[in-house]
Amino acid sequence: MELVFATNNLNKLEEIQTLLGDKIKILSLEDINCHEEIPETGDTLEVNALQKSDYVYRKYGLNCFADDTGLEIDALNGEPGVYSARYAGIEKDAQANMNKVLQKLQGIENRRARFRTVISLIINGKEFQFEGYVNGHILHQRSGKKGFGYDPIFKPDGYDVSFAEMDMVTKNNISHRGRAIVKLIEFLRKNYE
């Protein structure tokens, strides 16, 4: 089975292809010659994920899934949430985003947070959604060089290292995206294999 994953993020593609193995072939936006900016104008992760999968399905006629992920910090009333990628500006600068979080949390003891991913899958015109999340807390400073986004400042519950210090297999086993993808894979195997 082939599915388009509506992203240009090579890190996400690698993570997800690792989880899927060879049963399902993932095509990127580049693979289908989709070079335009896909709208993400929703105010929830669910709406943004649907906007992206629906765009690819309607324009290219290909079964597709898309995700949207947010870091939700308790002390910041759920920020940055749906605005995680552009928290410090439209440039999507991970370093600037982390700086903004660390600055806003200065002097705050409650550093509870969670990463949450919503996947929207459209197959033959019908949409299904899957959610995954992982609880943890925000570190006081960056730690680790692996991963991407907020990984260097997020430490998941039950671990003494940040996401950016974990190997990909360990991270995939516990990550928000990994958990959402497991639900997606179970659904695909049950209904389409």
Image: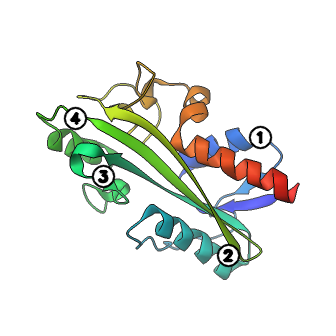
Which label is found at residue 21? 1
Residue for point 69% across, 38% down = 18
* Mark 2 neighbour class, 10 Å CA radius: few under 14, some 14 to 19, many 20 or more: many
Q: At which x and y percent is residue 170? A: 58, 26
Residue for point 53% across, 56% down = 118
Q: Secondary structure at mark 1?
A: loop
Mark 4 to mark 2 CA distance (whole Å):
42 Å
Mark 2 to mark 3 CA distance (whole Å):
31 Å
Q: Quarter holding the N terminus?
A: bottom right
Which residue corresponds to mark 2? Answer: 57
| Quadrant of residue 103 within the rendered picture | top left
Task: Identify which amino acid the numbered label 1 is placed on.
Answer: Gly
Residue for point 60% across, 41% down = 178
Q: Which of marks 1 and 2 precedes in the sequence?
A: 1
Which label is found at residue 58? none
- Whether residue 112 is visible here, answered yes or no, is yes
Mark 2 to mark 1 CA distance (whole Å):
23 Å
Q: Is residue 17 left or right of residue 140?
A: right
Q: Secondary structure at mark 4?
A: loop
